[in-house]
Amino acid sequence: MNKKLTVTLIALMMVLTACTPTAGEAGPAGEQGPAGAQGPAGEVSQEAIDAAVEAALAEPEAEVGGTLVIYSGRKESLVADIIAEFAATSGVEVEVRYAKSPALAGTVVLEGAISPADVFFSQDPVSLGVIAKEGLFDRLPDSVLDNVPAWAVDKNGYWVGTSGRSRSLVVDTRDVTDAELPGDIYGLADEKFRNRLGLAPTNGSFLAMVACMIESDGEEKVLDWLTTINGLGYGEYPKNSPQVAAAAAGELDIGMINHYYTLRVLAEDPSAPIKNVYLDGGCGAMVMPAGVGILSSSQNKPAAMAFVEFLHSKSAQETFTNTVYEFPLVAGIEPNELLPDINSLNSPSNLNWSALALWQEKAVELIAQAGY
Amino acid sequence: MKTPKLLITTNVLILLLFLMPLFYLFWRFAKLSRNLSSFFNSWDVTTLLMNTVFLFIAVVLTSLILGLTISILTVRYSFPGSKILFSLTILPLVIPSYIGALTYVSAFSPKGLFVDIFSRYGLEEIIGIEGFVGSWIVLTLFTYPYVQLICSSALRNLDSTVEDAARSLGVKKIKMYTSVVIPRLKKPMIYSSLLVGLYVISDFGAVSLMKYGTMTKAIYSYYVININGDPVIFYSAFLIVLALIISFAQRGSEMSKSAKVSGTPRELNKLELSKKSTYLVLTFFAVVIFFSLLIPVGVLTFWLVRGLSNNISITGSLAGVAGSLTAATVTSIFAMIIATPIVVMISQYKSKFGDLFEKVTLTLYGLPHIAVGISMLFITIKIFPSIYQTFITLIISYLIVFLPQAVGGGQASMEQVKISYIEASTGLGLSKLDTFFKVTFPLIYKGLLAGAALVFLSTMKELPQTLLLRPTGFSTMSVDIWSNASEALFTQAAFSGFILLAISAFPTYILSTRNLDN
């Protein structure tokens, strides 16, 4: 018990000194961590210290330390606080490389055995599948895999889900009636939606959806769908959030997005004239896990495991659902009240995430071929 | 005098090292399993190529018109404030295209700053500048100063008596410029056009933010989706070939020499403008400065003030400022050191080999950064894993593309070092090395410093290589601007943007006024 306290205090002191700029420090700035990862620089409140000590006393984990390199495909603004909390409570020094999930997955595959990364924290299952396919992940223990439902883990146990994200349509409630909306994504390729649709052709989740469509319905049907949508005229967006803004502003009727962007706007402004519509079945109703895996080449597996476990902790899960509006995956965590019941969503069952990884490049090709 | 062997060996080694990204890409390209025609069938190669070419032509034309007009007005006519207006119109040079594009996208977006003003006058269709038009406008606004710098200095050296003669013969003003002045400026015009063109095809930031599909944007999108895929290698190699063609065309144009000596520079009699014309000219400058300087700086100021008054913390961006300064300082120092033997060889020992060497070095300048970055990424992972994602790799990649600037600076001052000085010195018994330190170096260090200053400024602005190669946890102002903007954290983006512009503006201003006095 005493030893644990000492370790925690030393870790805290390290955090404190790291935050205090010293005049004599002239080393290359590259050796300093990103300021964001440590919260507001120079300040560690009494509360944080208390919380850290409490956490250290409460969790009887193996002792971890050293440096942990996280490749995060999840955005800095969404996960920096969670990672900082992990660093503060575990005493692990964390370095984070933020980029798009598919880019990081490709990088890890290219790096292979020399990868500096210990864990890969991904926005989507397809990117995790890319790494799993190459056999670069360690198998995770059942104790971790069993934390979440079976649909949100890799079939071979190479990665585990951390939160859930559903595909959805954001609709402008002033211009769209429920009755005119189709049951599945193919129904959008209809004359009545001419110039009313929006999508983000380079967005990872959109690509994942197209990959899912190729896997379940075949190339030809998907190319046909893409071509028809293109012919109908659509609003092209760089990513999901501007579609929600456009729908709220009355510029877009129907946008193909992930569910939480709409909820984020509704949380700020409940009177915004938009809502999510969840399709009934098919790839347009897909619920995808964001997830995490430990690289076989990691030099600090205890810390990597501690991080994975931390993402299933009550605190991290509550952050995912209450600030990001995602579905918590660990049992016993109350989903945010804006979320629909995840059991009411009709996501295709038995999706093979690794197979989707194989279709990713084909999806890009088809989208280009359809003239986007 | 024969070139010392040590000098040749050093330089050849440096150059081979620096050309490695090129060799590597071509090697990978040759290894691609598919045949060439399959690329054209399965991807949007033709569209991307056409988009790139259209943008090239459009930006070059408008930059040329804008830069040439400013040059003629400031060099040939006298009007109040012409000197300061010349400097102010040079200043957009310091605004990286991604900052320019970011501010334009924001200002003119459907929820942007100017929407109210536009809709009040029924101009809604202006709202939402993006795609080809957006890229065209933004790239023109931040590249015309290259034309202005080059053409104005050529124009200053152009004998104006021919124009006087033409005028006395009753040739009308417009006609005089089209038939007398512009034909004689052909070479600097071609030279600066190609410089602008190189900038356009290599630009990554502006076209990405404007969502216009060019080669650079394709390389990055394919990199994000599948870094190991063939398209990344294919497009990178393709873009490099394109850049090399433009680069060689530019060398071939040999503008500087002929344009500079075509006439005796003399005290010019600047023409007076009528009152009406003066107002017209001043309005023209006001418009140019409004769009190229005031909008970007104004939008940044707006974001910063709005954010700071809402107590948004910008401390997270300080690490980026430190990172940029460190990287730029280290790069410029090494650029100076590495440039020295190259400068000595090219200028002091005139030889065919030296000429070739000069050409190759200058070619590095036109290499698209994103392609070099991709290549360096592969090289460090596959061949030199020990320096992968290190500060060293980042600096080397900067040096590869910015070394020509340091060499150029050194070369200019090297012209003063006559071979007879060296011969005298060695004749008096000094060793070659002593001669270098006692005679040559003191004469050229100022030029090298000027070159290093340029390297410093360029490094600070660099984006694509920094994004690809930086060590984990290391950030720079350019990366902060890029990532903060993509998450709509405009206060933080504006803060980094402001510091970046502030640091660059002063030296650029000095350089431009010096240019005017000479």
Image (cartoon, coloured by chain):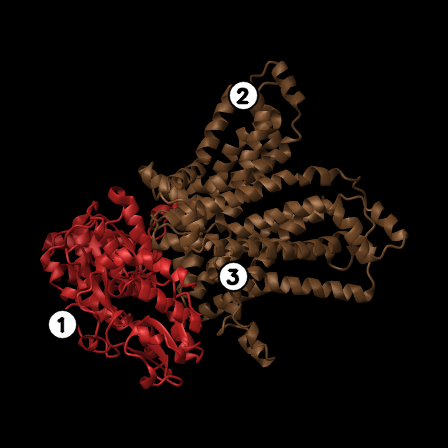
Chain colours: A red, B brown
- Disc nearer the start of the sequence (2/3): 3
Going by the picture, which residue comes out furthest to the right?
B169
Residue indicated by mark 2: B433
Amino acid, disc 2: Leu
Residue A46 drawn at (x, y percent): 25, 64
Residue A332, label in figure: 1
**Label 1 – label 3 distance at C-alpha:** 47 Å
Element class at badge 2: helix
Q: Which mark is residue B101?
A: 3
Nearer to us of marks 2 and 3 is 3
Secondary structure, mark 1, is: loop
In x, y percent, where is residue B162? 84, 46
Counting labels gives 3
Let me know if marks 2 and 3 both belong to one chain. Answer: yes
Relative to residue B41, is residue B247 depicted above or below?
above
Can residue A28 be seen here? Answer: yes
Residue B162 sits above or below residue A267 on the image: above
Q: Amino acid at mark 1?
A: Gly
**Image: A366 above or below B165:** below
The structure residue drawn at horizontal position 30% and vertical position 45%, both measured from the top left corner, is A110
Q: Are marks 2 and 3 in contact (CB under 8 Å)?
A: no
Residue B383 pos. (x, y %) = 33, 36
Label 2 or label 1, whichever lies nearer to me, is 1
The answer to whether residue A60 shows anywhere in this view is no
Name the amino acid, label 3: Ala
